[in-house]
Amino acid sequence: MSVGEKFGQMLIAIAVFGVVFIGVLLVASRFGGRRGDRVQAASFVGPVLLFLAVGLLYPAVRTIYESFRNGSSSGFVGLDNYVSIFSESELLRVVLNTVVWVAIVPFVATAVGLLYAVLVDKARGEAFAKALIFLPMSISLVGASIIWKFVYEYRPSFRPQIGLLNQILTKLGFDTHNFLLNEPWNTLFLVVVLVWIQAGFAMVILSAAIKAIPDDIVEAARLDGVGPLQMFRFVTLPAIRPAVIVVLTTIGIATLKIFDIVRTMTGGQFNTNIVALEFYNQSFRYQNIGLGAALAVILFVLVIPIVVYNVRQLRKAA
Amino acid sequence: MSTTTPAITDAPVRIDTPRRGGTARAARKALSSRVASVVAIVIGVLWTIPTAGLLVTSFRSAKDINTSGWWTAVTNPSFTLDNYREALTGGTTNSLAQFFINSIVITVPAVLLPILLASLAAYAFAWMHFPGRDTLFVAVFALQIVPIQVTMIPLLTMFNKAHFSGSYWSVWIAHTIFALPLAVFLLHNFMREIPGELIEAAKVDGAGHVRIFFGVLMPLLTPALAAFGIFQFLWVWNDLLVSLVFLGGVPELAPLTVRVAELSGTRGTAWYLLSAGAFISIIVPLLVFLGLQRYFVRGLLAGGLKG
């Protein structure tokens, strides 16, 4: 396909949807009165509901169904797929690695983001300082993975180092370390990449929450002679608690679903595999539909309690 | 937050309070603020160095990259554009220029389509009355929790049956579907902020929903649409999973992320190529982000993050 054809197809797609959009509005505007209101509402909401029902709801139900069937989806196997995930040592390792990710990324990213938000609050050059931390959020996970793979680049000690971390190690007199290969720490070095990205997100949300604390409360505490640490502990933290929970849960959910980092940096080798990557491999590389579906369902099931907790907390706060 | 007037609450009035306490307290305060600055600077530097390292590397010759660390470029600067030239034009089928175009062709409709569809639905949920409205809105909102992984195999099967698979249509439609729950939720929140009197006044003047939608709401919603647009742009441009599943087998149509990830797998030590490739894929979202950061932050604060 030539470049012209590609852009042609793009314009056609936009035009098709534009025509549908305008068509819906034209049809809607022709109806008046009470019944007309219903027709108008249906034509406004209809397209979205159709897309979601066919493209999200039906596939989700279908995947749950497939997760009880065999690899080629030709017969039922009951809970076999789930049993293998939690009994075969290789798959169990995948689940445990995912647990490690979810146990570390949200908390460390939120802690760093919160610390930084507090430190730069009302400081000189705040906007610039924030942009530095925030920038990784615009980078693709693939790009971030390559950036960090270069930081971790390994060479034997006697050769000139090109990876920053190993250069530091050799300068300090240690041997070089193969960060992405040596278990079990390699998973932690992958986790760092997501922390690096998500800290910016945490920082932005928490910084806004800190700025929303009424000035008179902060002023009153300051006049009472409250020091910075106590201020943080007794004024700032309670005031931004709901925002902290939103940040923790949002990052937690994102962490479960991300597979780009592991896939780009180690390909899931050296025992760094996680559920989201194993789902991709089983479904699209090994064509093992049943097991892939079961892994996807596990992701879904793991997300639900986090969301429920989040909604409960929000309701409590409201 | 108002969409029509600048938020005045953002600029708190500073009142200088009279100094109290002795010099000891002042000293402690100065010390703590100095410690705070140092810690902040350390974090800022730590967060920037990895990117800076690869950026510097992308401008060094392949030989330099392999024989000395990028930090030596500070004392011994020697830069070249060869890596970018090689990455963009080297080999006719593998040049990143082609993948760059694919990324654009994939992203533009995948940003516009959900905005069109979601703004219609968001309007209906915000300002129209019909039975089951609130239940449906909660249902759409709740669909945000479905991980896209759960939908992929059946979606791929459907695209195969409809002969969409292996074409741009599959990624356009997939991205649109995945964007809708968040888009409807975000735009609905922004639309609810518009004062009801405006809508009522337009109704009294005899305007139908279509005229209210275009005449009253759209002009006021530009910042909201921008906020969501940037979200969706970054999401689609940076996406790997959706493109890999629906276009992975078609290198001719695959976006930059797929190609750069592949390079990392097959040419993992060719840093001259990887570094330039990574920055070619990063530069567009980076510019968009820096230019429109304000809207992006607003979107984040209004609706959380998609993943």
Image (cartoon, coloured by chain):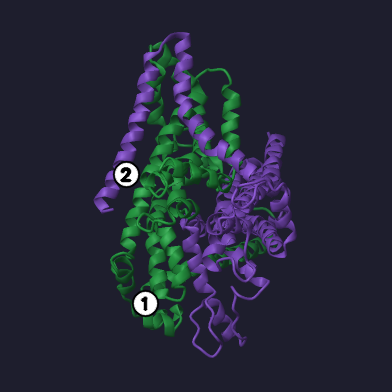
Q: Nearer the viewer, residue A246 or A218?
A: A246
Q: Nearer the viewer, residue B134 or A257?
A: A257
Real-space CA distance between mark 1 and mark 2, rounded to the nearest whole angstrom: 37 Å
Contact between marks 1 and 2 (CB within 8 A): the answer is no
Q: How many neighbours does mark 2 have within 10 angstroms: few (below 14), some (14-19), or many (20 or more)?
A: many
Q: Position of residue A104 (x, y in %)?
A: 67, 60
Residue corresponding to mark 2: A10
Residue corresponding to mark 1: B60
Specify the subunit that label 1 lies on.
Answer: B
Q: Nearer the viewer, residue B89 or A60?
A: A60
Please say whether residue B1 is visible from this viewpoint. Answer: no
Q: Which residue is pictured at 54% across the width and 91% down the height? A: A158
Location of residue A250 with respect to A146 vertically, above or below? above
In the rendering, what colour is chain A?
A: purple
Residue at the outermost left position: A4
Q: Which residue is pictured at 48% across the width and 9% down the height? A: A34
Residue at the outermost top position: A33
Please say whether residue A267 is visible from this viewpoint. Answer: yes
Callout in the foreground (1, 2)? 2
Q: Is residue A116 left or right of residue B227?
A: right
Q: Secondary structure at mark 2?
A: helix
Location of residue B274 with respect to B182 vertically, above or below? below
Q: Is residue B112 left or right of residue A281?
A: left
Q: Position of residue A185 (x, y in %)?
A: 66, 71
Q: Position of residue A80 (x, y in %)?
A: 72, 52
Which quarter of the figure has residue A317? top right
